[in-house]
């Protein structure tokens, strides 16, 4: 028995459901057209099941944040969903006032309606408890028109925002299929992963990774940690290795002196479980050029891991039963520096292991390499995934648990 409800716990026939999803899409800055519909596709199992069960479906979602360039209404999102389910999706440019209320009242079983961007409501992003949010205009106006609240926005599960947790105090509530799948899979990898369990962290950020690595090693969730990208550079710098002016400047934009103290403490405790690159690839006269670690510092940017590191990491990964990938191994957008990401990710995808991928750039690299069908689980979460891995409570999950109680 799960400690939160799922779609299996309710009868949806002729019931009005409020379905909170994460349709915060990548947009083209000039045209504001949607560039990728992956986030909508991920929620299709929930939407299609509700249509089949003859529910009246009212979708709540956000796009961008107030005053940001991608803060638009959800009309294009409704059209994108319409194409994917091959069925009319209604849109109303209102969230909870008369237009929205009338549209909800007129819904027929099996019909889908998307309300406007919930972040147009000023109270949406206020940090409050579920009980406080339940007294908001948004919740007070919508909940009397609904029978059940469903949360399928795992990517936003770390946020204590109004439309994410407010309805759980006033309506029977459950997790959608995407939320359920994410939580079930991640609970397995965090609480009881098949061993050995190896985590690879890369990408262009490192400050948040430090605490995550410490928790993973402390809890014995991870047996080994492989580092590439900026996290690897930060760890090398903490060991006293000079990387060169350009590389040091990149690091200074991302982290603080305090971060390096944290890394040193981490290395003092767990250095035998943390593996760093042996060589790198840099851009020299537009070409890929590999250097050994003892050739540092260098005037060029470290854009990728080198051949020796690729082979060494493959060798370490060959023993794994569970592999988690977060962050590419280099600047994969540039084909000359795709090699590390391509070889490591392809090796993991073709291994007979339980593999999990998380984070926007990691998923983009997996899709660019067309490996998505070979990965056991691709997580939609960024911040929520990190917090879950660190053992922190997710406000959305806690609200669903309380609703079940």
Image (cartoon, rainbow, N blue to C red):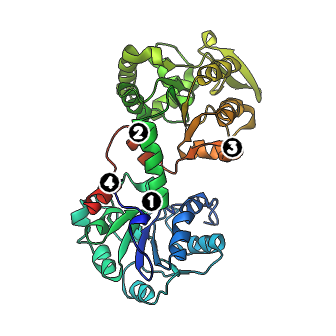
Depth order, front residue of 197/337: 197
Q: x and y percent of residue 57 in the render?
A: 47, 77
Label for residue 389? Answer: 2
* Mark 2 / mark 3, whichever is N-terminal: 3
- Determine whether 139 is above or below 259 in the image: below
In this figure, which residue is indicated by the disc labeled 3? 371
Instruction: Give the mark toward the camera: 4 or 3.
Output: 4
Q: x and y percent of residue 365 in the render?
A: 65, 42
Q: x and y percent of residue 93 in the render?
A: 48, 80
Q: Secondary structure at mark 2?
A: helix
Marks 3 and 2: in contact by CB < 8 Å?
no
Q: Residues within 10 Å of mark 1 (few under 14, many from 20)?
A: many
Image quarter where the C terminus lies is bottom left
Label for residue 153? Answer: 1
Q: CA distance from mark 1 to mark 2?
A: 17 Å
Is residue 367 toward the left or the right of residue 109 in the image?
A: right
Quarter of the rendering containing residue 289: top right
Q: CA distance from mark 1 to mark 4?
A: 18 Å
Q: Residue at x 49, y 65 (%)?
A: 71
Marks 3 and 4: in contact by CB < 8 Å?
no
* Mark 2 / mark 4, whichever is N-terminal: 4
Q: x and y percent of residue 268 in the render?
A: 37, 14
Q: CA distance from mark 2 to mark 3?
A: 24 Å
- Determine whether 272 is above or below 63 in the image: above
Q: Residues within 10 Å of mark 2 (few under 14, many from 20)?
A: many
Label for residue 3? Answer: 4
* Mark 1 / mark 3, whichever is N-terminal: 1
Quarter of the rendering containing residue 203: top right
- Determine whether 6 is above or below 383 in the image: below
Q: Is residue 115 visible?
A: no
């Amino acid at each position: 028995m799960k400690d939160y409800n799922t779609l299996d716990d309710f009868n949806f026939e002729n019931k009005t459901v409020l379905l909170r999803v994460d349709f915060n899409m990548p947009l083209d800055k000039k045209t504001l057209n949607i560039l990728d519909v992956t986030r909508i596709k991920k929620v299709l199992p929930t939407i299609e099941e509700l249509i089949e069960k003859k529910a009246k479906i009212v979708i709540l979602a956000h796009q961008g944040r107030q005053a940001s360039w991608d803060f638009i209404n959800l009309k294009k999102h409704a059209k994108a969903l319409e194409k994917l389910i091959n069925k009319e999706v209604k849109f109303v440019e209102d969230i909870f006032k008369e237009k929205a209320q009338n549209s909800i009242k007129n819904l027929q079983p099996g019909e889908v309606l998307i309300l406007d961007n919930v972040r147009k409501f000023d109270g949406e992003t206020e940090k409050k408890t579920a009980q406080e949010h339940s007294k908001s205009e948004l919740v007070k106006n919508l909940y009397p028109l609904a029978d059940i609240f469903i949360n399928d926005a795992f990517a936003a599960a770390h946020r204590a925002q109004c439309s994410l947790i407010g309805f759980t105090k006033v309506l029977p509530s459950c997790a959608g299929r995407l939320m359920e799948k994410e939580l079930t899979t991640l609970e397995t990898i965090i609480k009881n992963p098949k061993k050995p369990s190896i985590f690879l962290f890369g990408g262009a950020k490192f400050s948040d990774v430090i605490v995550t690595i410490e928790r993973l090693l402390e809890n014995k969730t991870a047996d080994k940690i492989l580092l590439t990208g900026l996290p690897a550079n930060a760890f090398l710098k903490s060991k006293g290795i000079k990387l060169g002016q350009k590389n040091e400047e990149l690091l200074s934009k991302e982290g603080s002196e305090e971060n390096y103290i944290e890394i040193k403490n981490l290395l003092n405790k767990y250095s035998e479980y943390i593996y760093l690159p042996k060589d790198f690839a840099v851009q020299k006269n537009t070409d890929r050029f590999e250097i050994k670690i003892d050739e540092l510092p260098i005037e060029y940017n470290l854009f990728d891991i080198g051949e020796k590191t690729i082979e060494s990491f493959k060798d370490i990964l060959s023993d794994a039963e569970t592999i988690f990938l977060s962050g590419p191994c280099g600047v994969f957008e540039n084909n000359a520096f795709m090699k590390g990401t391509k070889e490591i990710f392809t090796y993991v995808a073709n291994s007979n292991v339980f593999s999990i991928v998380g984070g926007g750039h990691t998923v983009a690299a997996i899709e660019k390499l067309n490996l998505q069908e070979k990965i056991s689980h691709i997580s939609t979460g960024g911040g929520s995934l990190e917090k879950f891995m660190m053992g922190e409570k997710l406000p959305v999950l806690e609200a669903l648990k309380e609703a079940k109680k």
